[in-house]
Image (cartoon, rainbow, N blue to C red):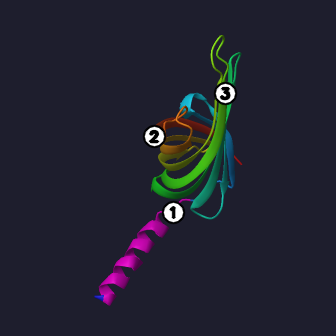
Amino acid sequence: MKKLFLLSVTVFAFVFSSHAQDIADNAIGLRLGDSDGLGAEVSYQRALGDNNRLEIDLGWRDGTNYDGFKLAGLYQWVWGLDGDFNWYAGFGGGLGSFSFENPGGKDISDTFIFAAGDVGIEYNFDIPLLLSLDFRPEIGFGDDIYNNNDLDFDIALGIRYQF
């Protein structure tokens, strides 16, 4: 039984390591999703090894009656699919804050933290361009005003320059 377990672990490790894809040392660009009403995020990725990286995203919005920001950090593993296609998965969290000025009413503000998962697919072009599509479920912890401590599903398109 021990030998079968060790053989299974070895084969599993070989499969995932043999499909590992080299990733760029750095990538910067935009992550275009709903981001809980904050819209586009500035996104930075930093390689930490051959098949893992750190992604940091900052979204902000400023208007006449509102302003807010959201900062997310994610650790991701990247695996090769076929050719220049990769898929990735990861986890992380972040924090944010927002405020609304209600004319003639009560002003609303909230600061919150959240935990997040991330799974997506990306394509590396021959030029230093990376396109991705990802799904990021987030669960927030804060006042009931913002997220009602509920689960949010964020789907986004990423466009990044690799260097």
Disc nearest the viewer among 1 and 2: 2
Q: Which residues lie in the magenta part?
A: 2-21
Secondary element under disc 1, as helix, strand or loop, is loop
Find out whether the residues at labels 1 and 3 contact each other: C-beta distance under 8 Å: no
The residue at which mark 1 appears reads as 20
Would you call the spot at circle 3 few (<14 residues within 10 Å), some (14-19), or many (20 or more)?
some
Residue at left offset 45%, top offset 38%: 153
Disc number placed over residue 148 in the picture, else none: none
Mark 2, residue position = 150
Q: Main secondary structure of the magenta part?
A: helix
Given this view, does label 1 or label 3 mark the residue nearer the observer? 3
The answer to the question of whether label 2 and label 3 lie on touching residues, with beta carbons closer than 8 A, is no
Mark 2–mark 3 distance (CA, rounded to whole Å)? 19 Å
Q: Earlier in the sequence, mark 1 or mark 3?
A: 1
Q: Amino acid at mark 2?
A: Asp
Residue occupying the far left of the picture: 1
Q: Residues within 10 Å of mark 2 (few under 14, many from 20)?
A: few
Q: CA distance from mark 1 to mark 2?
A: 35 Å
Q: Quadrant of the N terminus?
A: bottom left
Query: Quick check: is 121 in the magenta stretch?
Result: no
Q: Nearer the viewer, residue 21 or 3?
A: 3
Identify the residue shown where x is 47% and y is 63%.
19
Give x and y (percent) for residue 35: 56, 34
Please give the residue where the numbered disc 3 appears in the rendered image. Answer: 99
Is residue 42 visible in the rendered structure shown here?
Answer: no
Instruction: Tell me the residue at 50%/49% (across/down).
Output: 118
Secondary structure, mark 3, is strand
Q: Residue at x 65, y 10 (%)?
A: 104
13 falls in the magenta region: yes
Q: Nearer the viewer, residue 107 or 131?
A: 107
Q: Position of residue 21 (x, y in %)?
A: 54, 59
Q: Earlier in the sequence, mark 2 or mark 3?
A: 3
